[in-house]
């Protein structure tokens, strides 16, 4: 196997060294291609471009494999909790009992927001999208810690990590309470991560709120399943923004905005809306399957297929069981869940979808769980953001320590007008 790849352009030849990852992935190093040949590669959406070498997350889309730091997502979802998984992503190893206890305590003592921030939430209209508040709130947090967010200072990076992990759930819960006109509920340091978030979301001052342990566990699983997913849109945004050496708060705020898009963090909302539309059409899944196969029909089956996975998304298998458990307990029976199961059964046995490798992804069932929890549609991407937070932090930290780091600066192929003479305004 050659350790170089040869690219021939007219009468020029470029030899790029081959790079091989720990799982056998291969890449051609083209970092000096433009300097040597004057040419660049063209790759819309960067689908075939490796911009980093990372040791955080491994995905084998053909075989439906997802691992964090070498550990299978199935094992983490079954045996771990979100804080432990976050530690694994950020620091590279599963923590000892002493390490996870210290990490948990370091997060817990920072869950409160400064009282100065309360007017911040009141300034938004009640109908403000919670993702806008979450992004703005993340950036606003940085203004309170301007002497402690230097990206080149390891101590500042560490305290910023704790503060983001601790305070973003509080910001998210406050955004929700603002939207429904209820009083803000302060965090409780005696509760674990997911339980504390449920308390801030659903408790009211007028009566005690009992946290359902099954619901807390289901939320924990959802957060773990969303914790990191390699170089997706929002993670790439965090890395690209962070490459300018901006602080961690600003980079994460940008990641939240990228995640807000309907093609990324908003996909599970589209699934629920699609299922509701099928229900309104008397649950005729066969008609919608027919429409999905019609290339002239704009209808698309949401929650099937994935940019990376060409097999069953391993997160979808886990989340389907969670959805069954949560919906059975909270709703007893959900017609949308029944429609989803019928759709999945049909698609997995239909040659049209099998040939196109359109399998259920993590978004197909996650929205149904949030729906059973009585969360409004606009909170779905917020839960996604809270889950993805440790992945963003881990990726930003890895990027900051990369000896090959350069400020992100993609090239382009210019297709506009060639040189033109300026025409004075009176002659136009």
Image: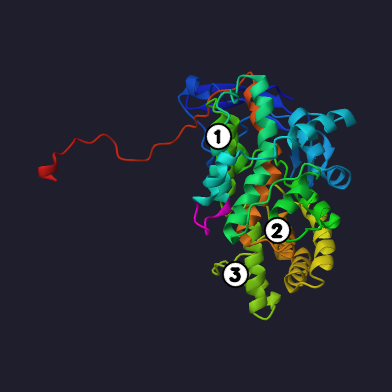
The quadrant the N terminus occupies is top right
Most common SS among magenta residues: loop
Percent from the top left, x then y, of residue 380? 65, 56
Alpha carbon distance from label 2 to label 1: 32 Å
Mark toward the start of the polypeptide (2 vs 1): 2
Under circle 3, the secondary element is loop
Residue 361 vertical placement versus 23 (above, below): below
Q: Which residue is at the front of the view, 72 or 331?
A: 331
> What kind of element bears circle 1?
helix
The residue pinned by badge 2 equals 204
Mark 2 secondary-structure assignment: loop
Density class for disc 3 (Cα within 10 Å; few <14, some 14-19, many ≥20) is: few
Q: Which residues are magenta?
A: 124-130
Q: CA distance from mark 3 to mark 1?
A: 43 Å
Across and down, in percent, residue 299 comes to: 58, 68
Is residue 266 visible to us here?
no
The answer to whether residue 287 is above or below residue 27 is: below
Q: Residue furthest front?
A: 206
| Few, some or many residues within 10 Å of mark 2 (<14, 14–19, 20+) | some
Q: CA distance from mark 2 to mark 3?
A: 49 Å
Which residue is labeled 3 in the image? 294
Q: What residue is shown at x 62% (from left), y 67% (from top)? A: 273
Residue to which mark 1 is pinned: 250
Residue 277 sits inside the magenta stretch: no
Going 67% across and 71% down the picture, which residue do you hit? 289
Residue 138 seen by the camera: yes
Q: Nearer the viewer, residue 304 or 40?
A: 304
């Amino acid at each position: 196997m050659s350790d170089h790849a040869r690219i021939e352009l007219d009468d020029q030849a470029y030899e790029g060294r081959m790079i091989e990852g720990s799982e056998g992935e291969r890449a051609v190093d083209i970092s000096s291609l433009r300097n040597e040949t004057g040419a660049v590669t063209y790759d819309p959406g960067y689908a075939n471009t490796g911009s980093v070498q990372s040791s955080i997350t491994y995905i084998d889309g053909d075989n439906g494999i997802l691992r964090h730091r070498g550990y299978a997502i199935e094992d983490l979802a079954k045996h771990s909790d979100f804080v432990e998984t976050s530690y694994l992503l950020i620091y590279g190893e599963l923590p000892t009992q002493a390490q996870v206890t210290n990490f948990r305590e370091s997060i817990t003592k920072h869950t409160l927001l400064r009282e100065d921030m309360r007017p911040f939430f009141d300034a938004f209209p009640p109908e403000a999208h919670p993702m806008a508040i979450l992004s703005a709130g993340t950036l606003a947090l940085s203004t309170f810690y301007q002497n402690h967010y230097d990206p080149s200072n390891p101590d500042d990076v560490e305290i910023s990590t704790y503060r983001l992990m601790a305070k973003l759930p509080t910001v998210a819960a406050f955004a929700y309470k603002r939207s429904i006109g209820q009083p803000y509920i302060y965090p409780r340091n005696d509760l674990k991560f997911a339980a504390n978030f449920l308390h801030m979301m659903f408790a009211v001052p007028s009566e005690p709120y009992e946290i359902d342990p099954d619901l807390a566990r289901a939320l924990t699983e959802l957060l773990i399943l969303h914790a990191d997913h390699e170089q997706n849109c929002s993670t790439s945004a965090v890395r690209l923004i962070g490459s300018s050496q901006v602080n961690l708060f600003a980079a994460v705020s940008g990641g939240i905005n990228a995640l807000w898009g309907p093609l990324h963090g908003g996909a599970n909302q589209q699934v629920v809306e699609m299922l509701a539309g099928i229900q309104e059409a008397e649950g005729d899944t066969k008609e919608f399957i027919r429409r999905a196969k019609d290339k002239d029909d704009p209808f698309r089956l949401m929650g099937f297929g994935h940019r990376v996975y060409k097999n069953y998304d391993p997160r979808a298998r886990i989340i389907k069981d969670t959805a069954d458990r949560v919906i059975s307990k909270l709703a007893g029976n959900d017609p949308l869940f029944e429609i989803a199961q019928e759709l999945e059964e049909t698609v997995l046995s239909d040659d049209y979808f099998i040939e196109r490798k359109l399998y259920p992804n993590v978004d197909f069932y996650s929205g149904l769980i949030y729906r059973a929890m009585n969360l409004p549609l606009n909170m779905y991407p917020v839960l996604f953001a809270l889950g993805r937070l440790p992945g963003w932090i881990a990726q930003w930290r890895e990027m900051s320590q990369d000896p090959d780091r350069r400020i992100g600066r993609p090239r382009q192929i210019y297709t506009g007008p060639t040189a033109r003479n300026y025409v004075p305004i009176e002659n136009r």
